[in-house]
Every structure is written in C-alpha cells, then in structure tokens.
Image (cartoon, rainbow, N blue to C red):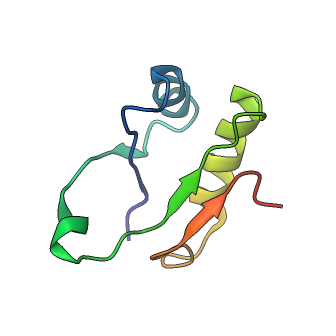
Amino acid sequence: MQIKSLMDENLPPIYQIQLRRKEPDLVIWAIDHLAQGQHIPGIFQINPSMSLGKTIEELVLAALASLDDEYRDRISYLPLQ
C-alpha cells in the first residue's frame, strides 16, 4: 500500500509544506471513501505541544518504518514512543 497523508482544514499549511519538503514522495490526498465504509490507512493525531520539526520526523518515521497495514483503521497519537 502506498503511504498517503490527509491534511485537513484544521492543520496549519506549514505541516504539509514541511512534510512534502522532507519526504516528497508522500502523496497528499483527500477522498470521501470513509463515508462509503472503506478502510483507512491510519490517522495520526498531531500533538500541539510538539515542535514542527519533531512532528515531521515522527510522521516520516511512521511512513518509512511501518508495515503496509500497521496503522490500518487506527488512530495513533504523536509522539509514537
């Protein structure tokens, strides 16, 4: 499964900019498949007390070091450790 990231309207645009700068192969997407009962690859809840840099590091680590379905249908909170 290809790793994707969903940026909603509540997340400052700098996160998308920095995530794409750090790992440009990640795909930014938004689909309405959840409303159709489809599976999700996983949701990461951003921790507002974490720095932008640490948040980006955590997201890239999760994307590159995870099994394809490790976060499927789960909500995970940052930091992951």
Q: How many marks?
A: 0
Q: Residue at x 42, y 68 (%)?
A: 41
Q: Residue at x 29, y 46 (%)?
A: 29
Rendered location of residue 38, percent (x, y): 24, 76
Report the quarter where the N terminus lies. bottom left
Compared across the picture, whether 70 is left or right of 61 comes to: left
Compared across the picture, whether 22 is left or right of 7 comes to: right
Towards the viewer: 78 or 21: 78
Towards the viewer: 63 or 55: 55
Q: Is residue 11 above or below residue 36?
A: above
Towards the viewer: 49 or 18: 49
Rendered location of residue 23, percent (x, y): 53, 38
Rendered location of residue 78, percent (x, y): 71, 52
Q: Residue at x 57, y 57 (%)?
A: 63
| Res. 67 image quadrant | bottom right
Report the quarter where the C terminus lies. bottom right
Q: Residue at x 70, y 34 (%)?
A: 48
Q: Is residue 79 above or below residue 1?
A: above
Compared across the picture, whether 49 is left or right of 40 comes to: right
Rendered location of residue 20, percent (x, y): 47, 32
Compared across the picture, whether 32 is left or right of 63 comes to: left
